[in-house]
């Protein structure tokens, strides 16, 4: 315990290099339904400042690919959905630049599919999201 206090004290005084770290977080699951043989937008990601200007595009990395369909990423425009108390809620009235997530389902009899992505916002904040796609 004494050694831990010494190390923590030295880190606080700037004598040791410090690193920021993140605690492991559960990966949320998003449920979507796509008809077999169809291509559908299943999500979008955007960041705007209070004047509704885009802060920049998001990066989407495929961690675990889908077993049946295809995942595509494209740039476009979407309506934000900020809550009324958020200063950016005025941006909800018009489309702003967004990074879209598109899923293309295979034709034929439906069955479930799944995949996992990592999304990285323009400030470098990363998060994994798991998608479960019902094909019906």
Image: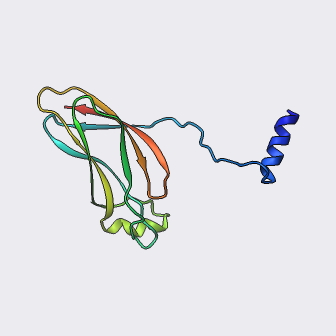
Using the image as rendered, state which of residue 94 and residue 108 is in the foreground.
108
Above or below, comparing residue 15 to residue 114 in the picture: below
Q: Is residue 24 left or right of residue 18?
A: left
- When asked about the image quadrant of residue 98, the answer is bottom left
Residue furthest right as drawn: 2
Expressed as whole percent of the image width and height from the top left, the position of residue 120 reads: 43, 50
- When asked about the image quadrant of residue 91, the answer is bottom left
Expressed as whole percent of the image width and height from the top left, the position of residue 70 reads: 22, 38
* Residue at x 15%, y 40% (from the top left corner): 38
Q: How many marks?
A: 0
Q: Is residue 2 left or right of residue 79?
A: right
Above or below, comparing residue 101 to residue 112 in the picture: below
* Residue at x 82%, y 47% (from the top left corner): 10
Dividing the image into 4 quarters, which one contains the C terminus?
Answer: top left
| Colouring scheme, one of rainbow, by chain, secondary structure, one colour | rainbow
* Residue at x 36%, y 60% (from the top left corner): 80
Q: Is residue 25 left or right of residue 119?
A: right
Dividing the image into 4 quarters, which one contains the N terminus?
Answer: top right
Expressed as whole percent of the image width and height from the top left, the position of residue 48 reads: 42, 65
Q: Is residue 8 left or right of residue 113?
A: right
């Amino acid at each position: 315990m004494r050694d831990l206090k010494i190390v923590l004290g030295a880190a606080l005084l700037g004598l040791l290099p410090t690193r920021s770290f993140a605690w492991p977080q559960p990966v949320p699951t998003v449920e979507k339904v796509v008809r077999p043989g169809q291509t559908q937008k299943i999500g979008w990601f955007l960041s705007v400042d209070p004047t509704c200007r885009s802060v920049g595009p998001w990066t989407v990395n495929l961690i675990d690919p889908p077993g049946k369909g295809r995942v595509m990423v494209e740039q476009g425009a979407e309506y934000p959905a900020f809550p009324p108390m958020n200063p950016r809620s005025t941006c909800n009235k018009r489309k702003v630049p967004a990074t879209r997530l598109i899923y293309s389902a295979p034709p034929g009899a439906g069955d479930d599919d799944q995949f996992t992505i990592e999304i990285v916002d323009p400030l470098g904040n990363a998060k994994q999201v798991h998608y479960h796609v019902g094909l019906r």
